[in-house]
């Protein structure tokens, strides 16, 4: 089987002691491609270092994660815009809105998000979008900006079916990760109603490990547990799910 982990921070410091081993475990588990979304200015170098070390099984994205938007966001965006001009990135991410802990920089987050949506349109690149406690504002912005030029993934999607439909109607794919395996995740109830050609798999490693690894540091190899659960819910062979979600990811990111 061939899986694509469409969202993993395996360059994170939590992998400093066993990063190479984690990559090997992923490859052995069938996770043959890992997409690396950026977080802030400090993660660019380690992310690119990992990609240079494993050019055949990793691809990098460039973006400023919403929780990292601070007073200096315009300088950071300027740096990232120059990075994107290098033409080595397969997507714009991780971008979005997050008002879960703090809405101090709400205006700055919105400005940052809209700027990065414009980059994606100009460059024809897919987005990896993070949305937490911001659905209404997120949809308003996407509806305003969507002219057929925006596409990508709603990363770590766990919302209700109506929210899924809104994102699908806006032209986006849904990124399903470890949360899908949790007992209290309502997504399982309507997952069979979603089009398989609009679903991709992800880990968000080192966060949100799936059952039976919940509570541990997540890693790309654990994607298989999420895939097995989703295949069980959809009542299809896991090989069919792997083939479909891999085809979706390859088409989206032109892999």
Image (spheres, rainbow, N blue to C red):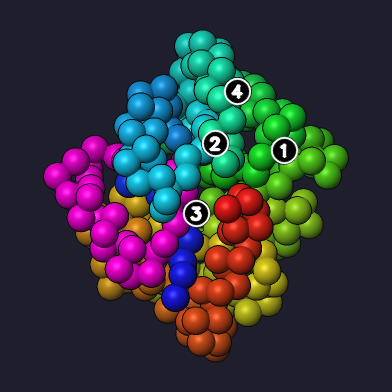
Residue under the point 55% across and 58% down: 175
Q: Contact (CB < 8 A) between labels 4 and 2?
A: no
Extreme residue in the right direction: 147
Above or below for 241 versus 245: below
Residue 167 position (above or below residue 74): below
Residue 245 occupies quadrant: bottom right
- Pointers 2 and 1 in contact (C-beta within 8 Å): no
SS at badge 1: loop
Q: Residue 124 has which mark?
A: 1
Q: Mark 4 points at which residue?
A: 85
Q: Residue 29: say if magenta.
A: yes
Is 47 on the left or on the right of 190, as rendered? left
State the image coordinates of residue 22 (x, y, percent, origin top left).
Answer: 25, 55
Q: How far apart are marks 4 and 3 (CA)?
A: 22 Å
Query: Which circle's residue, 1 or 3, is located before the other in the chain?
Result: 3
Q: Which of marks 4 and 3 is nearer the N terminus?
A: 3
Task: Kindly identify which numbered label has been placed on residue 89.
Answer: 2
Q: 190 or 177, which lies in front?
A: 177
Is there a contact, CB below 8 Å, between mark 1 and mark 3?
A: no
Sequence-wise, which precedes: disc 2 or disc 1?
2
Residue under the image location 55 percent in, 81 percent down: 240
The residue that mark 3 highlights is 6
Q: How far apart are marks 1 and 4 (CA)?
A: 13 Å
Region rendered in magenta: 11-37
Q: Which residue is drawn at 47% across and 40% down?
A: 60
Relative to 92, say whether 223 is above or below.
below
Residue 160 percent across, percent down from the top left = 62, 63
C-alpha span from label 4 to label 2: 9 Å
Q: In which quarter of the image is the N terminus?
A: bottom left
Q: How far apart are marks 1 and 3 (CA)?
A: 18 Å
Asked which secondary structure carries label 3, the reply is loop
């Amino acid at each position: 089987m061939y899986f694509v982990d469409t969202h993993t921070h395996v360059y994170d410091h939590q992998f400093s002691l066993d990063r190479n081993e984690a990559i090997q475990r992923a490859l052995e588990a069938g996770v043959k491609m890992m997409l690396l979304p950026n977080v802030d200015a400090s993660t660019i170098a380690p992310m690119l270092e990992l990609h240079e070390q494993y050019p055949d099984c990793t691809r990098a994205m460039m973006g400023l994660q919403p929780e990292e938007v601070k007073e200096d966001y315009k300088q950071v965006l300027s740096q990232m815009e120059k990075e994107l001009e290098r033409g080595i990135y397969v997507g714009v991410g991780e971008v979005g809105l997050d008002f879960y802990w703090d809405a101090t920089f709400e205006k700055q987050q919105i400005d940052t998000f809209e700027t990065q949506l414009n980059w994606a349109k100009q460059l024809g690149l897919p987005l990896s979008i993070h949305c937490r406690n911001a659905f209404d504002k997120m949809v308003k912005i996407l509806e305003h900006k969507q002219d057929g030029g925006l596409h990508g993934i709603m990363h770590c999607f766990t919302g209700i079916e109506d929210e899924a439909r809104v994102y699908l109607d806006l032209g986006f794919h849904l990124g399903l990760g470890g949360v899908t395996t949790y007992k209290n995740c309502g997504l399982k109830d309507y997952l069979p109603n979603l089009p398989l050609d609009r679903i991709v798999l992800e880990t968000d490693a080192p966060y949100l490990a799936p059952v039976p690894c919940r509570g541990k540091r997540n890693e790309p190899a654990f994607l298989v547990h999420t895939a097995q659960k989703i295949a069980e819910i959809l009542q299809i062979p896991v090989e069919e799910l792997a083939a479909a979600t891999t085809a979706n990811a390859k088409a989206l990111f032109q892999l």
